[in-house]
């Protein structure tokens, strides 16, 4: 049995991300068999006891994850074109939404420290709908990390044009973009001008390019679900916290 980095063990245990683990090691907040780990890169056997001290566990519990209904014309990431407004600018107390009718509500204060809050994945400027922003490396890893291959993303797409049954089959499986064969998708008609796409990958403008290949024009694209978390009735431009009952 080989030794692995303690940061990797903590990540595998779901206690924090590797990056967060390194920070806790630097702060002396990680124990290996009851002793403080004081050196980055320290390795251990998976059979050994690796744990976070109470201060680190509390810090993890305070990390926020929010669901935003992003409008068209907002960009997902701060490092995009500075000409446009980042979606994170909408995470303000005035835009907070917590429906009294929702089964899953949050007791968090909408006035919180947004430092480290970053998008977990992208949603292009011409698209609207569900964007996840998080301070928690575990959530980011789940959505865009190695584990993300199991995470479905659901979109409602308004289109213009007509396609054959063979074209619809092609959208489900068989399209190659930029010499890459796309993974199987689930695509079906919702009504005469709207398709539902369920993908397990998210290549650059993938749905728009897929539609273009079967001569469909996309007039609107909205993401409504990531994994087990749905946008539901969250109004456009509003945000809410991921509740304790929800998980991706």
Image (spheres, rainbow, N blue to C red):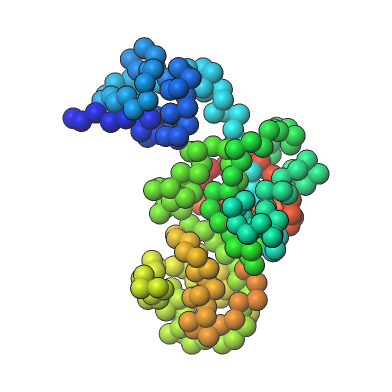
Q: Position of residue 129 (x, y in %)?
A: 65, 59
Q: Quadrant of the N terminus?
A: top left
| Image vertical order of residue 109 relative to residue 194, above or below | above
Q: Quadrant of residue 60?
A: top right
User: In front: 68, or 194?
Assistant: 68
Please determine whether, in this image, residue 217 is positioned above or below residue 114: below
| Residue, far top | 35
In the image: residue 101, left or right of residue 21: right
| Residue closest to the far right | 94
Q: Please state the horizontal and vertical placement of residue 32, each as a whole percent of the image.
A: 35, 17
Q: Quadrant of residue 114?
A: top right
Asked if residue 87 lies left or right of residue 31, the reply is: right
- Is residue 242 visible in the rendered image? The answer is no
Residue beneath the point at 48% across and 38% down: 138
Image label count: 0
- Can residue 176 be seen at all in this image of the molecule? yes
Q: Position of residue 160 (x, y in %)?
A: 62, 83
Q: Relative to 152, is 99 on the left or the right?
A: right
Viewer-nearest residue: 81 or 245? 81
Left or right of 129 in this view: 196: left
Residue ID at (64%, 48%): 67
- Residue furthest to the front in view is 82
Q: Position of residue 38 (x, y in %)?
A: 39, 17
Residue drawn where x is 44% and y is 67% of the image: 185
Relative depth, front residue between 84 and 95: 84
């Amino acid at each position: 049995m080989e030794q692995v980095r303690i940061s990797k063990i903590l990540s595998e245990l779901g206690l924090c991300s590797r990056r967060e683990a390194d920070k806790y090691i630097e702060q002396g907040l990680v124990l290996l068999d009851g002793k403080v780990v004081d050196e980055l890169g320290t390795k251990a056997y998976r059979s050994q006891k690796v744990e976070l001290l109470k201060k680190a566990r509390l810090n993890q519990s305070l990390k926020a994850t929010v669901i935003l209904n992003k409008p068209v014309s907002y960009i997902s990431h701060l490092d995009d074109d500075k000409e446009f407004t980042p979606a994170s600018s909408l995470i303000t107390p005035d835009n907070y939404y917590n429906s009294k009718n929702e089964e899953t509500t949050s007791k968090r204060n909408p006035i919180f420290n947004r430092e480290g809050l970053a998008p977990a994945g992208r949603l292009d400027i011409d698209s609207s709908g569900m964007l996840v922003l998080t301070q928690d490396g575990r959530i980011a890893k789940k959505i865009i990390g190695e584990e993300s291959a199991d995470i479905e993303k659901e979109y409602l797409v308004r289109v213009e044009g007509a396609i054959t049954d063979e074209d619809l089959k092609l959208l489900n499986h068989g399209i190659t973009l930029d010499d890459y064969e796309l993974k199987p998708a689930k695509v079906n008609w919702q009504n005469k001008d709207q398709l539902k796409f369920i993908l397990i990958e998210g290549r650059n403008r993938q749905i728009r390019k897929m539609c273009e290949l079967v001569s469909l024009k996309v007039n609107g694209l909205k993401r409504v679900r990531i994994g087990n978390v749905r946008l539901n009735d969250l109004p456009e431009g509003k945000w809410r916290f991921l509740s304790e009952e929800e998980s991706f």
